[in-house]
Amino acid sequence: MAYLYLFATFFKIGLFSVGGGLATLPFLFALADSSDWLNREMIGNMLAIAQSLPGPIGANLSAYTGFNYASIPGGFVAVLGLTAPSIIVILIVARTLQAFKESAVVKSLFAGFRPAAAGLLSAAAFGAIMLSLWNTAAVVWYNSIRWKETLIFAALFFFIVKVKKHPVVYIISAAAVGVILKL
């Protein structure tokens, strides 16, 4: 029953997370809010791990979530549930798009998907920033900001925009700083 629940949950997430792996985050936040086996702090940790591993972020997030819920088979079932809608939709769209690729309705649909994807990705980015830099358990405002993490974020953001090294350099650097600062 646990596997069926995982498959159905991640099938729904995969069906509606337009925009890629990070677009799954709002759905995972909703899952965390409605379950007792997943919380927002875990999602922040999962996101850090998922982004530093090879492979699609959404699949990594679902595998990690499924593993936490139902061990190794749960990880496989969650990934299968997440990817199944994409496979089904791609097969259907590929068959029918050829006939309607010049249709104004089809062009309008794709034009509408772009802002939806941007909105989902923006919500995911905002959620990840809040998880990483904000401490919701703090009593006073100046303790709500995770100062060390905020400085690391600002420094990495600056270097990513200005220096433009390979992303692995930043991942390894951030991990090293996290170990040194005992975050």
Image (cartoon, rainbow, N blue to C red):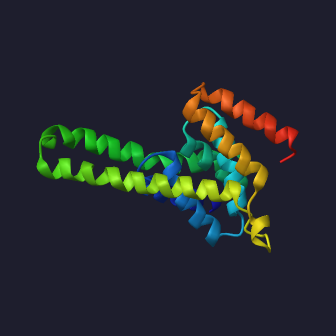
**Residue shown at 67% from the left, 27% from the top:** 169
Query: Along the line of sight, which residue is nearer the eye, 95 or 162?
Result: 162
Q: Quadrant of residue 40?
A: bottom right
**Residue shown at 80% from the left, 74% from the top:** 139
User: Considering the image in quadrants, where does the N terminus appear?
Assistant: bottom right
Q: How many marks?
A: 0
Q: Is residue 56 above or below residue 148?
A: above
Q: Is residue 52 above or below residue 42?
A: above
Q: Is residue 6 left or right of residue 173?
A: left
Query: Along the line of sight, which residue is nearer the eye, 85 or 130?
Result: 130
Whether residue 4 appears in this view of the structure is no
Q: Is residue 35 left or right of residue 17?
A: right
Query: Along the line of sight, which residue is nearer the eye, 142 or 5?
Result: 142
Residue at the far bottom: name it: 139
**Residue shown at 79% from the left, 65% from the top:** 143
Q: Is residue 164 left or right of residue 133?
A: left
x%, y% of residue 138?
A: 79, 70
x%, y% of residue 12?
A: 47, 59
**Residue shown at 61% from the left, 43% from the top:** 60
x%, y% of residue 17?
A: 45, 54
x%, y% of residue 126?
A: 56, 57
Query: Along the line of sight, which residue is nearer the eye, 91 or 104?
Result: 104
Whether residue 133 appears in this view of the structure is yes
